[in-house]
Amino acid sequence: MTLPQSVRDDAAAVEAHLQTLFTEMSGPADRLAAAMRYATMNGGKRLRACLVMAAGRLAGGGEAAAGLVEVAAAVECLHAYSLIHDDLPAMDDSDTRRGNPACHIAFDEATAILAGDALQTLAFGLLAAPRAHADGGVRAALVAALAGAAGIDGMAGGQMLDLEAETRPMVLDEVRQMQAMKTGALIQFAAVAGGIHGQADKAMQAALERYSRDLGLAFQIADDLLDYDSDSATLGKPAGQDADRGKASFVVLMGLEPARKAASDLITGAEAALDPWAVGAVADQTAALVSIARFAIERRS
Amino acid sequence: MTLPQSVRDDAAAVEAHLQTLFTEMSGPADRLAAAMRYATMNGGKRLRACLVMAAGRLAGGGEAAAGLVEVAAAVECLHAYSLIHDDLPAMDDSDTRRGNPACHIAFDEATAILAGDALQTLAFGLLAAPRAHADGGVRAALVAALAGAAGIDGMAGGQMLDLEAETRPMVLDEVRQMQAMKTGALIQFAAVAGGIHGQADKAMQAALERYSRDLGLAFQIADDLLDYDSDSATLGKPAGQDADRGKASFVVLMGLEPARKAASDLITGAEAALDPWAVGAVADQTAALVSIARFAIERRS
């Protein structure tokens, strides 16, 4: 499947904005800037950025508020940081990422650690800068939400649990929790951040939370299915890694067909959460979020 | 020399607040929480935290505003993150820190990388949370300032330049720039953040910037002097590391006595910047900042 034009336009706009950010980076640490750019401008699908844009427009009554692209860029920088550090020899020890040498291979390990560090910093800096939103309270709320999603109770904590799973196999509930933290939290932040930026009312914010929680879990189940199904060339990274390591994935613990059904059911639930906005002024934005959700489980890489 | 009682009280208050933060951390990633706590609660002098508190009270007309301790804790978390990552095998490869095993020795490399990552996140989360300051605009300004100090144009960029210096020796101006980024930026942030939190006027904010810029540079020159002078037992880390690696330090490039004089002159300049507030309602706060500055170059570890 392909994503609708508005979503592809959003991806292109965020891509261009990131390109500008890195082009404008000056200062003496140019090797660090090159590593940050390399790891961020790597052909990613920008799904998280597209979630920010579509959810932000939904909350804004159909219009993209000024500064929303800064939030989308911040999510991509945070995501890029996590991939750099996940790939490090001490972590998942992955030499390739999306078919290219991982950051620590293209540069070196120290530079990769610092590039991840500085990309995390950049993400928070983008959210806090006045051009992200005119209201300082909104900017601080975005930072607080990202900190919750990225820290010990979110992405970093989830990666810790994932590493521990290599020595102590997890049961399904533990895998679900680990993935909700490791992958789900940032996906959820992306949609919720759009709502925060557009100052959505409580009903819409709750719907975005429900939508993105289900989407995040479905996304990870789909990832496990891809890891099981794909060959390495399609995936852009070594396939079958999880099973080879004896890691407990959704596919291993649920079985192939139940995992497929669970992902599909979750996406149905995610769509249902947005039903109240499926018609009317913001119907196009809801449709965009629905298409992103479907894409998440139907993608081939 | 010893620091005045008010500064030691500030250090103790921040220490207690950090202890509470880590004690209250719950959730499944308890190994990560333990590593974060280990690396932060390591007997550090909390000079950066004391800068935040004294500068914040100076800006607040002598009173410590509610939430200032959150900002002080954030600076210490950011500092702890930087030490964890600096010590990693791929970076400075240091097995000890303040006389104890470095985080990646006490735990393991992956846990140490994640503990640093999550401490950086925590720092931004503390600044953005409502309890740091009632005004969201102030919280966002604190986040933006920390992002500037910690990222590619500050601490992370400085560490990159420091690593590059192992293969390409630097001249004095380059060392000065590198250290201003690597160490100076966070020290400067600490004082400036106090001013932001207390909503200092332009004159005071400029004075805090001048004070902390000079202090940051003096602090690093003092560090180089300690590295040259000390034995390892006093320093809590292997002494003479810089010279052994052929790294260009202030001592090597300036000579011992000129380096001592430069540090002393910088502290004189830092004190002079605060002259307008040396008498009157905030004289005690100014005296605290002066004592911290003197301590920075007279400390023995």
Image: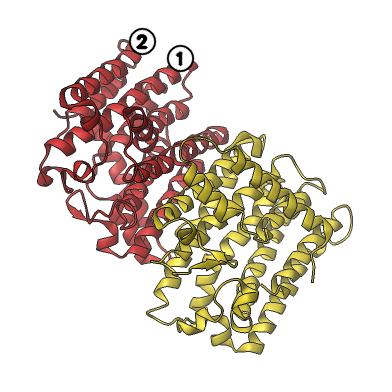
Chain colours: A red, B yellow
Give the SS element for disc 2. Answer: helix
CA–CA distance in space, label 1 to label 2: 10 Å
Q: Position of residue A72 (x, y in %)?
A: 37, 38
Find disc 2 in the rendering and name its residue. A276
Say if mark 1 contacts mark 2, CB within 8 Å: yes
Question: In this view, which residue lies farthest toward the right?
Answer: B280
- Circle number at residue A248: none
Q: Quadrant of the N terminus of chain A?
A: top left
Q: Position of residue B2 (x, y in %)?
A: 80, 67
* Foreground pick, B180 / B298: B298
Give the SS element for disc 1. Answer: helix
Q: Are marks 1 and 2 on the same chain?
A: yes
Q: Position of residue B107 (x, y in %)?
A: 46, 55
- The residue that appears at 83% across and 58% down in the rendered structure is B5
Mark 2 residue type: Pro
Instruction: Decide: is A293 above or below A89.
Output: above
- The residue that appears at 58% across and 45% down in the rendered structure is B141
Q: Quadrant of the C terminus of chain A?
A: top left
**Left or right: where B75 falls relative to B87:** right
Q: Position of residue A286 (x, y in %)?
A: 30, 19
**From where the camera sits, is residue B154 visible?**
no
Chain of residue at mark 2 = A
- The residue that appears at 54% across and 87% down in the rendered structure is B252
Find disc 1 in the rendering and name its residue. A203
- The residue that appears at 52% across and 36% down in the rendered structure is A144
Crowding at mark 2 (Cα within 10 Å: few <14, some 14-19, many 20+)? few
